[in-house]
Image (cartoon, coloured by chain):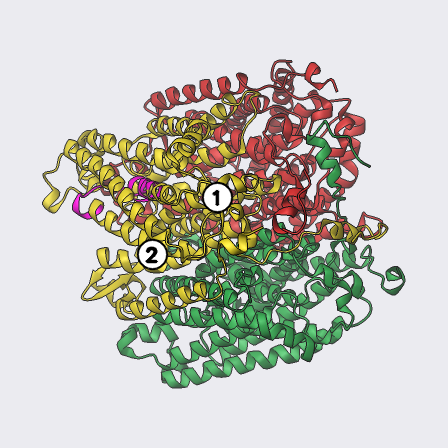
Chain colours: A yellow, B red, C green
Amino acid sequence: RHQGMAKNTNMRWRLPLVCLLWEVAMIVLFGVFVRFGAEADAHWEEEKREMNLTSDMENDFYFRYPSFQDVHVMIFVGFGFLMTFLKRYGFGAVGFNFLLAAFGIQWALLMQGWFHSFKDGKILIGVENLINADFCVGSVCIAFGAILGKTSPIQLLVMTLFQVTLFSVNEYILLNLLHVKDAGGSMTIHTFGAYFGLTVTRVLYRPNLEQSKDKQGSVYHSDLFAMIGTLYLWMYWPSFNSAISDHGDAQHRSAINTYCSLAACVLTTMAFSSMLQKKGKLDMVHIQNATLAGGVAVGTSAEMMLTPYGSLIVGSISGIVSTVGYVYFTPFLESRLHIQDTCGIHNLHAMPGLIGGIVGAITAAAATEDVYGKEGFIKAFDFTGVYQTRTPSIQGGFQAAGIVVSLLMAFAGGAIVGGILKLPIWGDAAAENCFEDGVYWEVPEDEESDVYHMHNPDKPASP
Amino acid sequence: RHQGMAKNTNMRWRLPLVCLLWEVAMIVLFGVFVRFGAEADAHWEEEKREMNLTSDMENDFYFRYPSFQDVHVMIFVGFGFLMTFLKRYGFGAVGFNFLLAAFGIQWALLMQGWFHSFKDGKILIGVENLINADFCVGSVCIAFGAILGKTSPIQLLVMTLFQVTLFSVNEYILLNLLHVKDAGGSMTIHTFGAYFGLTVTRVLYRPNLEQSKDKQGSVYHSDLFAMIGTLYLWMYWPSFNSAISDHGDAQHRSAINTYCSLAACVLTTMAFSSMLQKKGKLDMVHIQNATLAGGVAVGTSAEMMLTPYGSLIVGSISGIVSTVGYVYFTPFLESRLHIQDTCGIHNLHAMPGLIGGIVGAITAAAATEDVYGKEGFIKAFDFTGVYQTRTPSIQGGFQAAGIVVSLLMAFAGGAIVGGILKLPIWGDAAAENCFEDGVYWEVPEDEESDVYHMHNPDKPASP
Amino acid sequence: RHQGMAKNTNMRWRLPLVCLLWEVAMIVLFGVFVRFGAEADAHWEEEKREMNLTSDMENDFYFRYPSFQDVHVMIFVGFGFLMTFLKRYGFGAVGFNFLLAAFGIQWALLMQGWFHSFKDGKILIGVENLINADFCVGSVCIAFGAILGKTSPIQLLVMTLFQVTLFSVNEYILLNLLHVKDAGGSMTIHTFGAYFGLTVTRVLYRPNLEQSKDKQGSVYHSDLFAMIGTLYLWMYWPSFNSAISDHGDAQHRSAINTYCSLAACVLTTMAFSSMLQKKGKLDMVHIQNATLAGGVAVGTSAEMMLTPYGSLIVGSISGIVSTVGYVYFTPFLESRLHIQDTCGIHNLHAMPGLIGGIVGAITAAAATEDVYGKEGFIKAFDFTGVYQTRTPSIQGGFQAAGIVVSLLMAFAGGAIVGGILKLPIWGDAAAENCFEDGVYWEVPEDEESDVYHMHNPDKPASP
């Protein structure tokens, strides 16, 4: 084997250098810019009096912290374990996801802070910033899914640095310039993250990847580990889509819509998974992934008056689209377009993200004062200040523009970042060593014979 | 082997047809009936003003959403992973549980909605409905435990359809007609669900099940996967029993009583597990299951003034009863009564559920104005309107009647549904293929030799 | 083999006796002492009126219950699964942790109740008591990490009994006598728990432990199970450090500081893990453990105005210290000081706990009215009543004294309890059977050949 010659994957100085330098940069930037927001600052007692708040319960912490923790679980356990399905890449899946997300949330607190929480030269943070940082990193976790098993940890950190930056710019354009609603991030998180990742993996195309084809599958228990990730994403998605919605009915409604959409999505996924296999057997790849498309596809509209049956329709369609994608589109993308998409993020995030953006645009365009109530209408779309003359149909148009902007940012950004990641200095593995933890991790020797010996004292140990 | 001849387990058209038709039915029924309740509707701003609410915090969402998410985890991860203990049925355990629960919550929203949230021709839903739908499905997950590994996914969907319907009728009789208290569902969820499932498995008795005896056990890692389920059920059970209790002290008290009961239950389970094995070794089956009996057994009384020491007593007894059940009753039920109970739900849900109903009846009958306070007494048992003359002892009588009704509904319903499931059209597997994922799932080939080869580049790959 | 002769590990009568007698004692003591606090009692309606509370939301349950559930997950799943990394001690890790914690929380409710919630002869409990009981047990879980695999369940219960007692005394000295702040327990939980456990394992030194060296490692999937524990500890640590802080800004701030510290800690851990291995490969032991040091190290100061960048600094340092500890200190402690520390709690809890105590003392000493606001300053350090003349620098001194007291209690208590555990009556295993579940658990036979046979009907079963 010539892998040692072909590629230098030794991380010993490169990875520590990047981690430590960047962490020092974070400390300096946090030192200069980041402070506690009013609700987390010890001056809160005075603030409360000034704002005439009678109860500590009015602190945003109590409105959002439970949702924040659910989102946090989705990012670290949800995405982390979902990607452990590969038979020999569990350490990399959960470990690199941990690394890039831990860096990403720090950088996102800064980037999003400059755009959204900047006051008198300081970024003032509270629980909503933590949620938004997790959201931003979610888009990186999605992109990671496309390149899973084929990149070094340094490449992932570099990608995170750039993607968080671009995410924040895109988010600013959508939310502030276009005044678009996207509480669950169908456009900002899923569409952007997925097409960004797909573009990156296209640029990093590996023609000889079939050399590690035997490692691209799962084993029995790795599929069960992945189901932990799936279920935590599925269960907590109502929290994801409602986490930063307005207090009160909007949070409540987002959770209900998402719950309904996800439930429907499971049934259509199971149906098509069985239908598209000639013996009618269910495929764990579909169950692990396509069942989640319903959460993606109501990301924009969940806080709107989508209604429970509307959610069932959206969830049903997205489950079908996603499952069909795994069966037909993924092989096509790989063979014809040279897009090697390890986790099938095109099916789980890209297409459902587009559906989500479109459904959001339609739902916004169809909004009426009758359905929302006069006050509810203004509050739901924040039609105040310079936006008070905006009509639903114009809002729908801007929502649609948000999809286009997200796509353009993803393609352009992905192409540039992919180009940077292609430089031969980051220590990625040779094609034959992809999807293999042993490259970057100390892996224990699984000497099963020993294990047997242990609790069968009668059997002699075979060397 | 003649399995192919004996049974047609191909799901290709049957399963998709059922899933898709039923999902379309859900969409139509939701379209006709289901709307957002006042607290999730965009008119909430006006509602708030009318009800003189000064804070969005008064939205029921904030009282119940954290508990809802915990319950959600119990249904999907808790029950799903608890049943992964079988060595080759992990996909079916977690996957079919996912399928039936996702369908069941939709149907439960409708059934329970018609009974409890129907107003002017519409079902108005909010977070409490989501919790109740999860609760209802919990009873199906329990019944699934009895027939785990022996039924096709279509059978499970058919059972879910009928069981959710019967659950809702039984629940309506208990809560509305008998005016019984059962916040944690000892009667409505556990007693009903368990005896329903036991009756179904009795009707579906398989005389040749010993042909798949070798697959009915666990392997080392499948027992650890099951412990994930156990712990999430155990940890979140205080949320389960308090999720739909009255705001304030009742939710608070339910959580404390359940916490205490479960803690005591662990000790008596460990004690009897060790005592009943001749070498004194602990049995994972007991630890995975009997430790949870304490949560079941305070389901009815947790929101009452059971007191912490009362909870310890109930938890201690239920742990003993449950462990003894696994050692002595389960083999008896199988050999004498032909009840094949894969997960031992008789020990975890049926007997503790009965204990829970009885403890609830006694606790209600023993209630005094002295212990509850005048207002607290009325509020705790909702002795208002036509029930304002009800005395504690009469309430105790009605509570006891609730147990009897639940049992009758379970036996009758289970017999009928079991009969339906016995029809030879649902695609269940032959006895020799029970407890085997390969029948309904594409299962990866676990070629360990390959895995070794991968991180031991020295060893040659054996084909 | 002579293990049967050397040691009697049969638990059949000893373990049940201890469990049952102690549970009866708990019931009696709870019956005499424990009652519901005002917010969990049915008299709450009257209480509300007396206290002029307008909303049920003011019940402490809603301020703390979500955090409580997160802490609960950390104790049972977090610690339990973190310790499943050993290849053949997963049942013991998660099962014994379950046992000792379930007993410990009951005893802690009593011990802490007598010290802190005793009124008119009764211990009045609410959600804060549940959190504190979980905290107290956390210190026992930490100590368990040092002796993991080398002790019988009875020894663990005996240790729990004594450690909970000593914990409560130490906590009383720190919080009440020294008036020290330690919301996240850097001193009371981590420093005390870790040095207690290290002292116990020193006393129980096993000179022949290398006889079971082959079982002290991990296998591939056991490392993934352990990552479940790691991630739940990591994700929920912001809840841990904020769970019992004052309502409002203090809880909010604690969560933010902990979030920041933990994020930084991951990067420095990865950096040093790679740097200290000659091929630059990452070590799962470090990722599983040292990434958590950041949560320990801000335990005391998280609720203070540590600031986000301060948290990044503390987290960065603690990740480095902890990783270096695993590489250099642990072997040194074992070979020179005869401290056999199975999980490396010296690196994860002891050193970061000391850092946490010191950072807390410095942060307190540096507090000014300018930074906290006049009211915030008094509220943050509770400078009321007899403490109203205390200055920040004096507070810093008392904080430092708290570290010393915790260390002394840990060493003295650990020495005594270690001596008790050394008595030859508790049924611990011989050195050659350490780290082996088969001693105390019925372990399934993992006959892989059977498993293959099952889903490969073509292959004949090899016996």
Residue C453: x and y in percent read: 73, 32
Q: Find disc 1 in the rendering and name its residue.
A: A232
Nearer the observer, C199 or A20: A20
Question: Crowding at label 2, few (<14), some or many (≥20) Cα neighbours within 10 Å?
Answer: some
**Span highlighted in magenta in the image:** A175-195
- Give how far apart the Cα atoms at labels 1 and 2 are: 26 Å
Residue A187 forms part of the magenta stretch = yes
Q: Quadrant of residue B299?
A: top right
Q: Chain of mark 1?
A: A
Side of C277 relative to A195 (left or right): right
In the rendered image, which quarter contains the C terminus of chain C?
top right
Vertical placement of B161 versus C302: above or below?
above
Residue B27: x and y in percent read: 38, 22
For the residues beneath circles 1 and 2, the answer to whether they share a chain is yes
* Number of the label disc, if any, that sits on residue A161: 2
Nearer the observer, B66 or B175: B66
Q: What residue type is disc 1 on?
A: Tyr
SS at mark 2? Answer: helix
SS at mark 1? Answer: helix
